[in-house]
């Protein structure tokens, strides 16, 4: 290996100085300064919307910062596109796979290069890949199609692709989200060994504190676009990391608790109100009023149905009563309101079902 190639195969240091990025009126990054030392394994933590993806996309050339500087290996660099980042040895492994399932491992590695000849000499490429595979801790069959690989093996191919392209500053965006714990430990363990050997620098976005404690050397925490903490993993605990992420001294767990019912005789029970976590009292009052109206409507319908049944069952005796009232001239006539009320329920109009033949 030539001295130039040896220099390109070593890990590089990247530093961000006072970086600010805005999207309209929203400030995604606010004066962030972060140094990732060469050969280190740094975990980047933060809630959703904290600015993690914006930061790494500025490093990878997908976003242009509004203010700030980026230094690579101690020299200020202007990264305006992913091609510029690739030329500086900065690569990114995304959360979802970017491989072609119908192609083999060797074909995916070769076709990922920035420049590929119109006619590929596959024999020469295979010889070059065989030499490359001897320098990495991954063991994969180059002739195997991607579609036949497990999720952990596909993630290895993604990392192999970055190493094959000589990307010595590797950004990992949630690299274990589709892996089993065993696959995640294997992949991250290999990357940790490579960082300790000084072959690569890793900046990993993750939410899994177990993996941070097991593999990361340093931790940086973003909250609402600002860098709120950075330190050695050995000097931190998961509780402290969570505290830095959410910005409170105690992790809120109200969403996981349920308020107990008030005891009989208490003020809450006397007033007839019960508090529901996260629901204002007015909302509960509206719900109880709606339930009361619904119950009253059902009772009204049930009463009307019972009244109709009683009138239907007594229809056989009504003609005789009507005849008796007609024979007695002194009997007072029923008021008009009663006649109107009775007309709402017509008598003797229920057809008797015909008996089967």
Image (tube, rainbow, N blue to C red):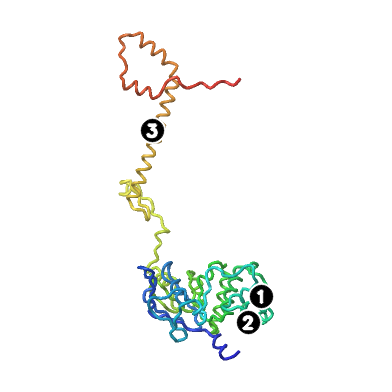
User: Residue 231: image x %, image y %?
Assistant: 42, 78
User: Residue 70: image x %, image y %?
Assistant: 43, 81
The crowd level at tag 3 (other Cα within 10 Å; few <14, some 14-19, many 20+) is few
Reading the image, the residue beneath label 3 is 300
- Rounded to the nearest angstrom, the CA distance separating label 1 from label 3 is 77 Å
Q: On the image, which quarter does residue 347 sit in?
A: top left
- Taking the image as shown, residue 204 lies to the left or right of residue 50, namely right
- Rounded to the nearest angstrom, the CA distance separating label 2 from label 3 is 83 Å
Reading the image, the residue beneath label 1 is 142
Label drawn at residue 183: none
Above or below, comparing residue 302 to residue 75 in the picture: above
Above or below, comparing residue 227 to residue 322 in the picture: below
Q: Pick whichever, 21 or 340, lies toward us.
A: 21
Q: On the image, which quarter does residue 51 sit in?
A: bottom left
Tell me the residue at 31%/12% (across/down): 331
Reading the image, the residue beneath label 2 is 132
């Amino acid at each position: 290996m030539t001295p130039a190639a040896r220099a390109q195969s070593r890990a590089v240091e990247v530093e961000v100085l006072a970086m600010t990025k805005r999207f309209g009126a929203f400030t995604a990054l606010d004066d962030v300064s972060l140094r990732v030392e060469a050969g280190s394994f740094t975990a980047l933590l933060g809630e959703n919307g904290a600015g993690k993806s914006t930061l790494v996309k500025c490093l990878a050339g997908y976003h242009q910062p509004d203010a700030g500087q980026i230094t690579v290996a101690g020299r200020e660099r202007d990264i305006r596109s992913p091609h510029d980042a690739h030329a500086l040895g900065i690569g990114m492994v995304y959360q979802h796979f970017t491989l072609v399932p119908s192609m083999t491992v060797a074909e995916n590695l070769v076709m990922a290069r920035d420049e590929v000849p119109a006619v590929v000499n596959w024999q020469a490429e295979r010889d070059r890949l065989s030499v490359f595979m001897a320098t990495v801790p991954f063991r994969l069959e180059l002739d195997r199609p991607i579609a036949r690989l497990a999720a952990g093996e596909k993630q290895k191919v993604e990392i192999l692709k970055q190493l094959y392209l000589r990307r010595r500053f590797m950004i990992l965006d949630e690299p274990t989200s589709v892996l089993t714990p065993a696959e995640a430990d294997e992949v991250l363990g290999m990357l940790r060994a490579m960082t300790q050997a000084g072959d690569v620098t890793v900046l990993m976005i993750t939410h899994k504190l177990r993996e941070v404690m097991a593999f990361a050397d340093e931790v940086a925490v973003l909250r609402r676009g600002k860098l709120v903490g950075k330190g050695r993993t050995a000097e931190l605990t998961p509780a402290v990391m969570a505290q830095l992420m959410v910005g409170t001294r105690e992790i809120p767990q109200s969403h996981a608790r349920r308020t107990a019912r008030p005891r009989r005789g208490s003020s809450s029970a006397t007033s007839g109100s019960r508090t529901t976590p996260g629901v204002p009292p007015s909302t509960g009052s509206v719900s109880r009023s709606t339930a009361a109206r619904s119950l009253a409507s059902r009772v009204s319908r049930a009463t009307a149905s019972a009244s109709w049944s009683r009138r239907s069952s007594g229809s056989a005796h009504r003609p005789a009563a009507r005849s008796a009232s007609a024979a007695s001239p002194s009997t007072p006539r029923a008021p008009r309101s009663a006649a109107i009320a009775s007309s709402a329920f017509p008598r003797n109009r229920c057809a008797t079902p015909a008996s089967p033949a």
